[in-house]
Image (spheres, grey):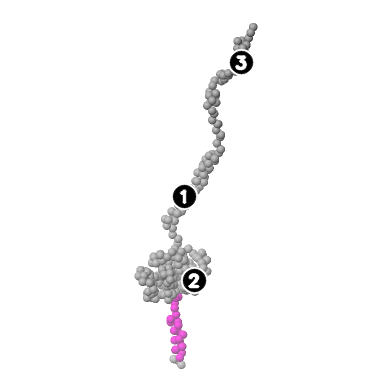
Amino acid sequence: MVKQIFFALLLLLAPLAHAETPAEANKRLFDKTIDELNFRTMETVYDKSFARGKFPLTLRTAAARRSFDGFDNNATLKRLFMNYNDAAERYKNRYGNGPNTLAEFQKQLNSVLLDKNFEFFIHNLPRDERVALVRAEQRLIQQATAQFNASGASEDAAAVPPADVDAQPEAPVAAPLTTHDEGSASAADAAEEPSLTSQPAASGPAPRHDWLDYFTLLLSLTSVLLLLYLTTSVLPVLSRRINNLAAEPEPEPEPRSLISRLRATRSPGLHEDRYEEDNDDPDHATGPHR
């Protein structure tokens, strides 16, 4: 009888002895999320490199990917994948030794998208595909953050002032951590797209402006000023000149003949010579008779 009671107690205490603490559960969730992020990244680059190939769904762990050799004898691409596989596996070391808080959990997951190894691995993708990949992985990070066990931070909260405890963000409602689904991946992305606009600015990398952006802005301002100058100064002057040229010129006097010009130059006191016809009357020729 005593043995049976002892055996029953062992059965009841066994699950408690192996119960997972909140910190251990959060660490396991972090590592699982890292594996999924790495898989999504490698899948996108592989499918873009091979139009007819498809990254196997079974390669969700770093150990499984080390034995993969489906690179069509492309040694450069294989070396790139193997190097990133080892570097990405070290992302798991970023969480677990520090504070077990939601802010730290989300910060370390977001740091993966800012890592130089990640940026180098996807730099050959077209820009729109890089943006789509980053947004998909941001949604995956949000889903993992929703599963964070906030009770694991109670031990760390006891060591900080109450003001800092109140500043800790609350854990959102838990949501399942999604995995790759060929049939519904695009539909799920489209359904979750409106939620991106409500994300805080700190959830992703802040936009950066380089010299090309400022140069483009300067050219735009110069074009606007030049257009205003042409509209207010140059165009009115050209319009007036065109109107003056289009006006009908005055008719010029007709050229006069040589005789008319000679007559016009004679003195006004001189009369024009007149020649009378010969008179046949003899009296007229010799004068009147007396």
The stretch drawn in magenta includes residue 113: no
Disc number placed over residue 40 in the picture, else none: none
Callout 3: few (<14), some (14-19), or many (20+) C-alpha neighbours within 10 Å? few
| Residue type of the residue flagged with mark 1 | Thr
**Rendered location of residue 91, percent (x, y):** 40, 70
Write down the region rendered in magenta.
Answer: 4-25
Q: Hey, which quadrant is residue 51 in on the image?
A: bottom left
Q: Nearer the viewer, residue 282 or 141?
A: 282
| Residue type of the residue flagged with mark 3 | Asn
**Residue beneath label 3, please?**
279
Q: Main secondary structure of the magenta part?
A: helix
Disc number placed over residue 185 in the picture, else none: 2
Mark-to-mark CA distance, 1 and 2: 46 Å
**Residue beneath label 1, please?**
222
| Residue type of the residue flagged with mark 2 | Ala
Residue 115 visible, this angle: no
Callout 1: few (<14), some (14-19), or many (20+) C-alpha neighbours within 10 Å? few
Taking 178 as reference, is 211 above or below it?
above
Element at badge 3?
Answer: loop
Q: Hey, which quadrant is residue 81 in on the image?
A: bottom left
State the residue lying farthest toward the bottom.
Answer: 1
**Rendered location of residue 215, percent (x, y):** 43, 53
Q: Nearer the viewer, residue 152 or 39?
A: 39
Residue 122 visible, this angle: yes
Element at badge 1?
Answer: helix
